[in-house]
């Protein structure tokens, strides 16, 4: 069904809450596992209908923020959703406490039950007031970043509109743009420190009310990490620091030489070529058509997926004045339909929508057919493998999008993937230190960041940008404020995506089959077990980083010795 034709009707919260309560009673009264499984399938119907209507209202609000009807509909769900979720969790508690759990596990799997246990542990009425305050603080951060007004040559820009100037081909232009960017952060720095301080104290208090000493374990629970903990992550970061950072420095050195400059400065970050970064050719329509050709050639499964998306008008990618900023992929479960929302702006980010976001959507399309709804609840460390790997699987079609610059694009893509890894680990280590020491002062936090930069990105030179030189750069990384401990997920996923890159260069068909299997497993297996099942190496296994470097080095024109 075309998105525009999907019927919408407001779901009455009272009604859905009483249906969950009915199901909960039925669950208690059920005499055996089979009847409980039947009840659970009725739960899927209620949940799927509610989720679908809420999502349709949200999308229709985002595509036209001036539409009064859907604005009100969205406000309605914002208001009632916490109560509806409480009723749903209460039903799930009855399910998890079932004496027939073993039998039910055969239907929905062990992972689903473990996720439920973690969710119950992480959410408790005792912390509701703190969670509300946490939400307010996060909104305060978002607002402070979104409402920045930068005076740029007579024009007023926000931070995201300033972005293209920060990677401008002219070094003087990007230097000026970065100066503006730095000025803004030094202006609002104290406020950002204050917000973060309150967030750290709030999250620590939440954990303490739940009986823990600090926020770390709760942070992991909130990310629904079921099969590894801070020790494994720390061991991975150690491998990165020891082996990967020196390798990434060589990639930075290659970039410096290519840019023809004496010393890389922070305003050269994200610039791959002295002639500028590759930009897509063709109109948005041509980009979409190229996407359709690409996916029809890639595999029968991707052809079916992309044709379905186009036929049912499940893309809204053109920038319009009345449209919300940013981009995302979401799903409408009732119609097993992924949906992609974006704002094309003429940069290579437009192609990312067709590769990265479509990787998410393709997996959503595949898992949307799985009748077990819990299998769709993938953790972020897995979700980003689907998207980041699709960027590599599609890279042989880049001529369609970048013409003669396709090779340059592929080079930039691979280098960016490599250079991201140390940065991502640094963001993660910073948060581990912060939450282990919630009493740290703002100045101490900045010092921590500064010393981590020396370890992870030693080439970095902030020149006269005093605020960043003193360790303030992390304040621009929204995840640190709004999604604690969500960042290493990108690194772990990138690590797996790079494995697919190496694999497809040897045997594209075999790598694709493995990827397809990964998409199908969805949330059906535990992380490391799943990687092993599809033939990937866990990032946590000893020596995995060294082996990765060895394979990547020749592709990046780097001679590695002594490994
Ligand atoms: Zn993504």
Image (cartoon, helix red, strand yellow):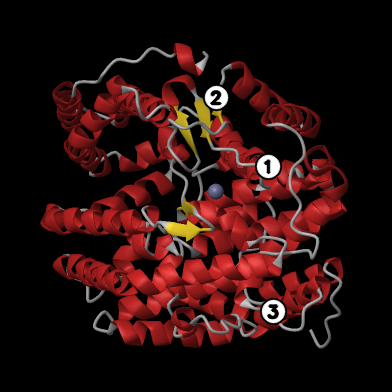
Q: In the picture, residue 99 is in which quadrant?
A: top left
Earlier residue among tags 1 and 2:
2
| Mark 1 → mark 2, Cα distance in angstroms | 17 Å
Residue 86: x percent and y percent?
Answer: 18, 40
Residue 314: assigned label: 2
Depicted 392 relative to depicted 9: above or below: below
Residue 529: x percent and y percent?
Answer: 56, 56
- Report the mark closest to the observer, 1 or 3: 3
- The quadrant the C terminus occupies is bottom right
**Which class describes the residues within 10 Å of circle 3: few (<14), some (14-19), or many (20+)?**
some
Residue 264: assigned label: 3
Tell me if I can see residue 113 in this picture. Answer: yes
Residue 226: x percent and y percent?
Answer: 41, 58
Disc 2 CB within 8 Å of nearest ligand 1 atom: no
Tag 2–tag 3 contact (CB < 8 Å): no
Earlier residue among tags 2 and 3:
3
Q: Along the horizontal axis of the image, is 359 left or right of 74?
A: right
Identify the residue position indicated by label 1 in the image: 351
- Report the mark closest to the observer, 1 or 2: 1
For the residue pair 552 and 179, the one nearer the viewer reads as 179
Under circle 3, the secondary element is: loop
Q: In the picture, residue 7 is in which quadrant?
A: top left
């Amino acid at each position: 069904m075309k998105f525009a034709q999907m019927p919408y009707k407001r779901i009455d919260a009272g009604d859905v809450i009483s249906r969950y309560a009915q199901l909960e009673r039925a669950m208690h009264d059920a005499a055996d596992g089979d009847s409980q499984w039947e009840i659970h399938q009725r739960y899927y119907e209620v949940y799927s209908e509610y989720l679908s209507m809420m999502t349709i209202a949200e999308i229709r609000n985002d595509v036209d923020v001036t539409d009064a009807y859907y604005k009100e509909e969205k406000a309605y769900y914002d208001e009632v959703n916490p109560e509806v979720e409480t009723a749903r969790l209460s039903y799930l508690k009855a399910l998890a406490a079932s004496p027939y759990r073993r039998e039910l596990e055969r239907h929905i799997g062990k992972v689903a039950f473990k996720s439920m246990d973690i969710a119950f542990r992480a959410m408790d009425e005792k912390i509701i007031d703190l969670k509300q305050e946490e939400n307010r603080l996060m909104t305060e951060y978002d607002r402070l970043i979104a409402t920045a007004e930068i005076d740029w040559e007579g024009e007023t820009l926000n931070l995201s509109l300033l972005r293209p100037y920060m990677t401008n081909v002219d070094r003087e232009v990007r230097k000026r743009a970065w100066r503006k960017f730095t000025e803004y952060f030094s202006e609002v720095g104290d406020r950002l420190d204050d917000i973060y301080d309150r967030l750290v104290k709030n999250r620590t208090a939440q954990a303490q009310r739940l009986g823990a000493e600090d926020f770390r374990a709760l942070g992991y629970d909130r990310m629904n990490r079921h099969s590894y903990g801070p020790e494994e992550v720390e061991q991975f970061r150690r491998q990165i620091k020891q082996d990967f950072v020196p390798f990434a420095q060589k990639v930075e050195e290659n970039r410096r030489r290519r840019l023809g400059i004496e010393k890389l400065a922070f305003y050269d970050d994200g610039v791959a070529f002295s002639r500028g970064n590759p930009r897509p050719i063709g109109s948005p329509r041509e980009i979409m058509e190229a996407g359709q050709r690409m996916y029809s050639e890639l595999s029968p499964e991707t052809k079916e997926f992309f044709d379905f998306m186009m036929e049912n008008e499940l893309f809204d990618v053109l920038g319009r004045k009345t449209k919300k900023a940013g981009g995302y992929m979401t799903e409408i479960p009732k119609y097993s339909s992924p949906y992609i929302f974006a704002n094309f702006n003429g940069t290579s980010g437009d192609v990312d929508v067709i590769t990265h976001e479509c990787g998410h959507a393709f997996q959503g399309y595949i898992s949307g057919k799985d009748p077990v709804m819990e299998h769709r609840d993938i953790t972020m460390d897995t979700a980003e493998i689907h998207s980041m790997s699709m960027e590599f699987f599609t890279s042989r079609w880049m001529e369609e999008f970048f013409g003669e610059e396709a090779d340059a694009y592929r080079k930039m893509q691979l280098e960016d993937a490599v250079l991201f890894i140390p940065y991502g680990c640094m963001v993660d280590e910073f948060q581990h230190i912060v939450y282990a020491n919630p009493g740290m002062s703002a100045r101490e936090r900045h010092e921590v960041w500064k010393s981590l930069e020396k370890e992870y990105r030693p080439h970095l030179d902030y020149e006269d940008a005093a605020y960043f030189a003193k360790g303030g750069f992390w304040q621009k990384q929204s995840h640190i404020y709004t999604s604690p401990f969500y960042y290493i997920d990108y690194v772990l996923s990138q690590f797996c995506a790079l494995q697919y890159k190496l694999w497809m260069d040897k045997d594209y068909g075999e790598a694709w089959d493995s990827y397809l299997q990964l998409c199908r497993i969805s949330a059906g297996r535990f992380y490391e077990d799943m990687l092993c099942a599809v033939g990937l190496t866990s990032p946590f296994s000893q020596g995995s980083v060294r082996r990765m470097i060895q394979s990547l080095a020749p592709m990046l024109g780097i001679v590695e010795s002594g490994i």
